[in-house]
């Protein structure tokens, strides 16, 4: 095939097959492109297949060619194809065979799916003049959103290529129940119709799918099944309706099917049709069960074309992207999805959309982000949402950056500032609110500390202590007067030293000395505090002059005297420097350095020795260096 491509780089194909047919096997696959993980379906077939029909192309190669040529929302989307090691590979969107999910579907889902297949057949016959020739359950697939897609295009042929010989050669490989027994005879009909083959096959498909559901569902299904059996499979092809007439049947004119069909074919609609559709969409969706709407329409409602439509942005998305938090709240009656339905069906789609680097799409999501962000788990916010938001703040679009920063602010309450901002943080701001005044009749810990300082302090802090005494007397005397709240500090004074800080420093110093005696003397201090100061008459709040020392009341002798200075209580370690007398065993071994004593020897006369060894001793005089030699 001339349009073949090379193998997709980085693709990972699952060895286990989902389905195995006569000509190929279907496998799941995934590929990472631009940092995004995409799931695909891979069909693998042999390069050489026996049979006269497949001399030039294998069934999988012919199916690939038709998928490349005929593009429709209800036909499987072609991705790529290549050959490798005597195998042919076809990559398409992620789909699974209809036969694997059909027993789990309800009547409404089946109705929507049959309508999609019918739309695909209508496109092939009316727009492409081509016949599928093998419409059956095995040629239909479903996406993860539940949409039915037509596949199995290996027997498709143009009208001009349909012949009796072709039909007879392919009959053995096509699905028997979908083959018209008289198709070769009817091929040369005077009407020149070529759609009768697929019309007959579609009737057989409907009869087979609805066969097991007639007992439980509405009579509409039974009526439509009879219609397909007697009209679509009529031996007289002139009485067989066209695909356009089948689409007009009441079975396909339900509101839900109409909504689904319009969303699928949205690219084909004009602006006027789109505007009219979105204006009334929300009211229509409320008429259906939210589970059906979420499972069948959530993917279509979150498609790119819907998100970028202005009418949809104003009328649909505010309701769509806001889950119900309380079913009994009347203010949320207009909303469509509960939190449970939102989590199951919309959350996975939103996670995928957040990976899309489109400014308009991202702006739209972030405008409603605060309404649905609680639906995501913490891991999803950290792993999927937060990295994408951090990318957004680096964009050159100021509007996108502003909206992204607002969304990051919303995430702080959920993830914490450390996860959102990162890096080391410190407390750089203080609380500058005014401190409220203490209640009447209560003594704060700071005031008690100041009183203790008055009782035990003196000397260098005499002036400050006297001021503290006067202030304490004022506070005790005004107990009957309405107290005024403390005046807040003016701006800029927080950094200056105030009387309050002096009091605190005094209290702290005495706190150290009296820590052990704190609890024992606390009650006595409070009593002494009220006894030492004279109350000021009501109405006169001016500060009274200090009392002389002689008039001050002496403390109660029963009161325990204050503890002495901490230095006096400190334990002193005294080092004994007295050395013990030790016996020195080596005292007699010490060398004695002293001048040798001189002894006088009496002079003896010269003695002459005789014999051989006698030496003559002569006076040599002074033969050393003389004084003149130093010169």
Image (cartoon, rainbow, N blue to C red):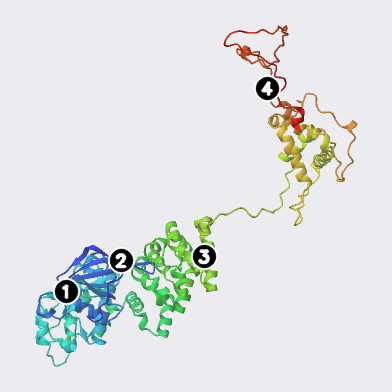
Which one is closest to the eye, mark 1 or mark 2?
1
Judging by the rendered image, the residue that carries numbered circle 1 is: 47
Distance between the alpha carbons at the discs numbered 2 and 3: 31 Å
Q: Position of residue 250 (x, y in %)?
A: 28, 79
Judging by the rendered image, the residue that carries numbered circle 4 is: 575
Indicate which disc, 3 or 4, sits on the residue closer to the N terminus.
3
Residue furthest to the front in view is 611
- Look at the image and tell me in which quarter the N terminus lies: bottom left
Category of crowding for the residue at label 4, using alpha-carbon neighbours closer than 10 angstroms: few (below 14), some (14–19), many (at least 20): few
Labelled disc at residue 317: none
Indicate which disc, 4 or 2, sits on the residue closer to the N terminus.
2
Q: Are marks 2 and 3 in contact (CB under 8 Å)?
A: no
Say which of 445 and 568 sits in front: 568
Which one is closest to the eye, mark 4 or mark 2?
4
Q: Is residue 571 above or below residue 162?
A: above
- The answer to which quarter of the image holds residue 236 is bottom left
Category of crowding for the residue at label 1, using alpha-carbon neighbours closer than 10 angstroms: few (below 14), some (14–19), many (at least 20): some
**One can see residue 448 in this view:** no
Distance between the alpha carbons at the discs numbered 3 and 4: 71 Å
Which one is closest to the eye, mark 3 or mark 1?
1
Residue at point 43%, 68% (across, down): 354
Distance between the alpha carbons at the discs numbered 1 and 2: 23 Å
Category of crowding for the residue at label 3, using alpha-carbon neighbours closer than 10 angstroms: few (below 14), some (14–19), many (at least 20): some
Residue 186 shown left or right of residue 100 in the figure? left
Indicate which disc, 3 or 1, sits on the residue closer to the N terminus.
1
Distance between the alpha carbons at the discs numbered 4 and 2: 83 Å
Numbered disc 2: secondary structure: strand
Judging by the rendered image, the residue that carries numbered circle 2 is: 30
Labelled disc at residue 407: 3
């Amino acid at each position: 095939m001339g349009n073949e491509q090379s193998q997709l780089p980085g693709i990972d194909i699952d060895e286990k097959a989902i389905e195995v047919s006569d000509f190929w096997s279907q496998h799941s696959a995934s590929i990472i492109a631009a940092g995004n993980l995409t799931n695909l379906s891979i069909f693998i077939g042999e390069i050489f297949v026996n049979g006269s029909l497949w001399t030039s192309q294998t069934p999988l190669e012919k199916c690939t060619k038709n998928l490349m040529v005929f593009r429709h929302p209800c036909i499987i989307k072609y991705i790529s194809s290549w050959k490798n090691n005597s195998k042919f590979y076809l990559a398409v969107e992620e789909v699974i065979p209809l036969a694997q999910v059909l027993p789990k579907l309800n009547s409404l889902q089946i109705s929507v799916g049959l309508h999609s297949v019918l739309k695909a057949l209508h496109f092939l016959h009316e727009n492409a003049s081509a016949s599928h020739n093998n419409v059956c359950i095995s040629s239909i697939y479903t996406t993860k959103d539940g949409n039915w897609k037509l596949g199995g295009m290996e027997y498709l042929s143009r009208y001009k290529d349909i012949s009796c010989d072709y039909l007879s050669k392919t009959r053995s490989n096509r699905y028997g129940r979908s083959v018209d027994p008289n198709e070769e005879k009817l091929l040369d009909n005077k009407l020149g119709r070529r759609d009768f083959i697929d019309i007959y096959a579609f009737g057989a498909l409907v009869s087979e799918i609805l066969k097991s559901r007639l007992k439980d569902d509405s009579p509409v299904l039974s009526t439509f099944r009879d219609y397909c059996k007697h009209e679509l499979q009529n031996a007289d092809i002139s009485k067989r309706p066209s695909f356009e007439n089948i689409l007009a049947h009441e079975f396909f004119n339900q509101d839900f099917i109409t909504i689904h069909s319009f969303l699928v074919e949205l690219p084909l609609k004009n602006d006027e049709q789109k505007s009219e559709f979105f204006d009334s969409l929300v009211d229509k969706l409320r008429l259906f069960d939210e589970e059906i709407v979420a499972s069948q329409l959530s993917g279509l409602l979150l498609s790119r074309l819907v998100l970028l439509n202005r009418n949809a942005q104003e009328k649909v998305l505010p309701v769509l992207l806001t889950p119900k938090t309380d079913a009994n709240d009347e203010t949320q009656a207009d909303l469509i999805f509960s939190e449970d339905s939102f989590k199951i069906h919309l959350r996975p789609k939103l996670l995928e959309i957040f990976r899309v680097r489109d400014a308009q799409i991202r702006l739209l999501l972030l405008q409603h982000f605060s309404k649905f962000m609680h639906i995501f788990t913490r891991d999803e916010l950290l792993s999927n949402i937060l990295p994408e938001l951090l990318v957004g703040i680096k964009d050159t679009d100021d509007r996108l950056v502003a909206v992204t920063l607002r969304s990051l602010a919303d995430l702080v309450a959920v993830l914490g500032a450390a996860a959102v901002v990162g890096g080391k943080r410190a407390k750089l701001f203080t609380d500058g609110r005014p401190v409220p005044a203490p209640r009447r009749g209560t003594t704060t810990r700071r005031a008690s500390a100041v009183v203790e300082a008055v009782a035990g302090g003196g000397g260098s802090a005499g002036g400050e202590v006297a001021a503290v005494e006067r202030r304490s007397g004022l506070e005790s005397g005004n107990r009957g007067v309405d107290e005024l709240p403390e005046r807040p500090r003016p701006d800029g004074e927080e950094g200056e030293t105030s009387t309050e800080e002096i009091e605190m420093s005094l209290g702290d110093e005495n706190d150290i000395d009296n820590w052990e005696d704190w609890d024992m003397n606390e009650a006595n201090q409070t009593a002494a505090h009220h006894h030492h100061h004279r109350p000021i008459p009501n109405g006169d709040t001016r500060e009274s002059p200090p009392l002389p020392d002689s008039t001050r009341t002496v403390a109660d002798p029963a009161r325990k005297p204050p503890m002495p200075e901490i230095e006096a209580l400190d334990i002193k370690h005294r080092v004994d420097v007295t050395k013990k007398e030790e016996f020195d065993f080596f005292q007699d071994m010490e060398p004695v350095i002293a001048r040798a004593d001189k002894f006088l020897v009496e002079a003896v006369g010269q003695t002459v020795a005789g014999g051989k060894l006698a030496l003559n001793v002569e006076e040599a005089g002074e033969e050393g260096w003389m004084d003149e030699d130093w010169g």
